[in-house]
Amino acid sequence: MVLCVIGPTASGKTALSVELALKFGGEVISCDSMQIYRGMDIGTAKPTAAERKGVPHHMIDVCDPSEPYSAARYAREASACADDILKRGRLPVITGGTGLYLNALLYGIHRAEGSAGLREDIQRRNDLHTELSNLDPAAAARLHPNDKRRIVRALEVYYSSGRPISEHHEESKKIPPRWKTLIIGIRFADRAELYERIERRVDRMLELGLPEEINALLSRVPPPCHTALQAIGYKELGDAEAIKRNTRRYAKRQMTWFGKMPDVQWIDFSENILGEASKIAEIAGLHKL
């Protein structure tokens, strides 16, 4: 069995995942599209050694910010991690807020592949985000206008298959997961509580030296390698209010995405969240592992 812990940013997924891994003999697999990058620690809220509490963590710091990365690559590498953990008699605990990566990992990538010629033709065009907005509004809404790589990919899928990439994503959710899976989701009865947590997290990031981290990253990975600037916390260049605003918006999109996932065992954020999650896990049979 595989355990997943999902929820919006700043909801306490990492801490809960570590405690569940300790309780049920597990190892954590990060499902965060920005924690894969080396040198992006503060702004992506990577768990520190102390926060990991000795629990092995996978899919963190696996590539450089200038290196292309995709949901398909994540699915290959993270599934290999999960299979290895299972072979060793341990429990994979997948946690993170990147719904697309989680979807690819659990259900696979099922969509048309384009050609190099088509990709190059799309890359030469101007105003790609507007083009995508006209063809696939759902995909355009979740992609930043500067995220050229993913916009090109969405257009490539559309022109290859004649269908929006968002439709492919929805179809993949109907496919049975590759493992027996328990998905625990964190939600907030009072959304204001989540927003307060977001604001405190951003303030803490700035205290820890986020602006310095951004400057160091940009000096090492100059334009046109803009992966860092596509991540919330980096593209705002240290503007606290902009980071908080964009993080709140991102949390809303995460809740919408996860809210459409099937078979999620939802628990409300509370001081007893570990107890609630442990009870669900025990009912699912994790205590027998």
Image (tube, grey):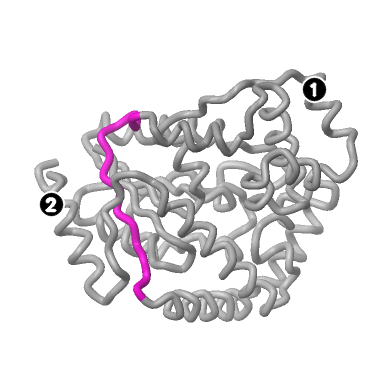
Q: Locate residue 52, reporting x and y percent.
A: 38, 60
Dividing the picture into quadrants, the one containing residue 285 is top left
Quarter in which the C terminus is drawn: top left
Mark 2 or 1, nearer chain start: 1
Residue beneath label 1, please? Answer: 118
Q: Locate residue 211, reporting x and y percent.
A: 71, 72
Is residue 183 one of those drawn in magenta?
yes
Q: Identify the residue at horizontal 31%, vertical 62% (top origin).
A: 16
Q: Residues within 10 Å of mark 2 (few under 14, many from 20)?
A: few
Q: Locate residue 74, reporting x and y percent.
A: 52, 36
Q: Are marks 2 and 1 in contact (CB under 8 Å)?
A: no
Is residue 276 one of those drawn in magenta?
no
Nearer the observer, 212 or 94: 94
- In the displayed structure, 50 sits above or below 109; it is below
- In the displayed structure, 230 sits above or below 107; it is below
Q: Identify the residue at horizontal 50%, vertical 57% (top origin).
A: 254
Nearer the observer, 16 or 257: 257
Residue beneath label 2, please? Answer: 282
Q: CA distance from mark 2 to mark 1?
A: 50 Å
Q: Identify the residue at horizontal 82%, vertical 19% (top origin).
A: 117
Classify residue 259 as left or right of residue 137: left
Classify residue 69 as left or right of residue 76: right
Q: Locate residue 151, reporting x and y percent.
A: 72, 41
Quarter in which the N terminus is drawn: top left
Q: Identify the residue at horizontal 34%, vertical 53% (top origin).
A: 5
Tell me which amino acid carries mark 1.
Leu
Tell me which amino acid carries mark 2.
Glu
- Image mark for residue 97: none
> What are the residue bounds of the magenta stretch?
176-189
Total labels drawn: 2
